[in-house]
Image (cartoon, rainbow, N blue to C red):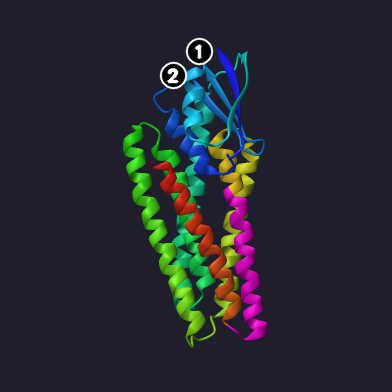
């Protein structure tokens, strides 16, 4: 078996990872292994890698074939099963906190919590698409990606419109206690997910992508907590709206990436 290394300069999140997997689906290879921090893709295959190289070039992600060498690595079914179970765990954590945060966000009048919930929902979409890819044809996966992307974009647009309305209106100050408590619980959930993912020490694409996304979630959680503290000291709605706006823009960017996958 051969191992071909591609350096992909624009590969920095699960969107590009899924894009590459979908593009290469149907081509002949044994395994894809991603090193997202170094932006490297390792393709284990038999024969000539030209078809793989051409497919990657069509994505316009700055793909460069680095080298091809002989490899004795094999795919471990047990490891793949463990990674699937771990991804399911992270998916359920993200979707569970999406439900909790969006409900408490509306009741507490906190756009920061609502925005954070959509960020968790965006992650859940990426994880579910990765899991859904197994055993399904590319066209079906692309259809699901398109629906998910448009739905996420609609939620982001609604959120930004609501933020603007609250900026211009006379809304009550959000309940900072709920903001801090719920975000702290979400922080614990994301920290636990991050610990499990890092403990796995996997070099597989989905695992490394999950670590990156979960790390970003921790930062967002801390941002909402900071906004809740600022609301307490300033007695103003603006810290919450500012954080909410930033996170909604991140959600919008995630939606655009998912839609790019569906092309």
Question: Between 74 and 236, which is closer to the camera in this rendering?
Answer: 236
For image coordinates 41% across by 57% down, the residue present is 152
Quick check: 88 left or right of 241?
A: left
Q: Is residue 170 above or below residue 215?
A: below
User: How would you classify the magenta stretch by its main secondary structure?
Assistant: helix
- Whether the residues at callouts 1 and 2 have beta carbons within 8 Å, the answer is yes
| Residue 4 x/y as whole percent | 59, 20
Question: Between 204 and 63, which is closer to the camera in this rendering?
Answer: 63
Q: Earlier in the sequence, mark 1 or mark 2?
A: 2
Q: Is residue 214 inside the magenta stretch?
A: yes
Q: SS class of the residue under badge 1?
A: loop
- Count of residue discs: 2
Q: Of all residues shown, which one is farthest toward the bottom?
A: 170
Quick check: 227 left or right of 82?
A: right
Magenta residues (range): 213-236
Q: Which mark is residue 4?
A: none
Question: In which quadrant of the rendered view does residue 234 lie?
Answer: bottom right
Tag 2 residue: 28
Tag 1 residue: 46
For image coordinates 66% across by 71% down, the residue present is 226
For image coordinates 41% across by 68% down, the residue present is 158
Q: Quadrant of the C terminus?
A: top left
Question: Between 43 and 222, which is closer to the camera in this rendering?
Answer: 43
| Residue 214 x/y as whole percent | 58, 51
Q: Is residue 193 above or below residue 137?
A: below
């Amino acid at each position: 078996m051969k191992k071909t290394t591609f350096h992909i300069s624009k590969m920095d999140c699960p969107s590009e990872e899924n894009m590459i997997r979908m593009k290469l689906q149907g081509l002949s290879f044994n395994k894809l292994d991603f090193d997202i921090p170094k932006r490297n893709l390792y393709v284990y295959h038999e024969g000539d890698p030209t078809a793989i190289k051409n497919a990657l070039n069509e994505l316009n992600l700055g793909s460069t074939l680095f080298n091809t060498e002989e490899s004795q690595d094999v795919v471990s079914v047990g490891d793949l099963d463990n990674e699937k179970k771990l991804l399911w765990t992270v998916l359920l954590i993200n979707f569970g906190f999406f439900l909790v945060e969006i409900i408490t966000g509306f009741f507490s009048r906190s756009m920061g919590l609502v925005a954070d919930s959509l960020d968790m929902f965006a992650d859940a979409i990426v994880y579910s698409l990765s899991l859904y890819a197994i055993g399904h044809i590319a066209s079906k996966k692309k259809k699901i990606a398109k629906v998910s992307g448009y739905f996420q974009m609609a939620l982001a647009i609604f959120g930004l419109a609501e933020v603007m309305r609250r900026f211009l209106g006379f809304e009550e100050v959000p309940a900072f206690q709920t903001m801090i408590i719920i975000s702290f619980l979400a922080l614990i959930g994301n920290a636990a997910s991050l610990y499990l993912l890092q403990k796995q020490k996997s070099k597989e694409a989905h695992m490394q992508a999950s670590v990156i996304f979960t790390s970003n979630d921790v930062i967002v959680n801390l941002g909402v907590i900071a906004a809740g503290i600022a609301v307490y000291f300033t007695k103003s709605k603006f810290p919450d709206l500012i954080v909410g706006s930033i996170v909604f823009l991140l959600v919008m960017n995630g939606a655009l990436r998912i839609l790019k996958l569906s092309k």
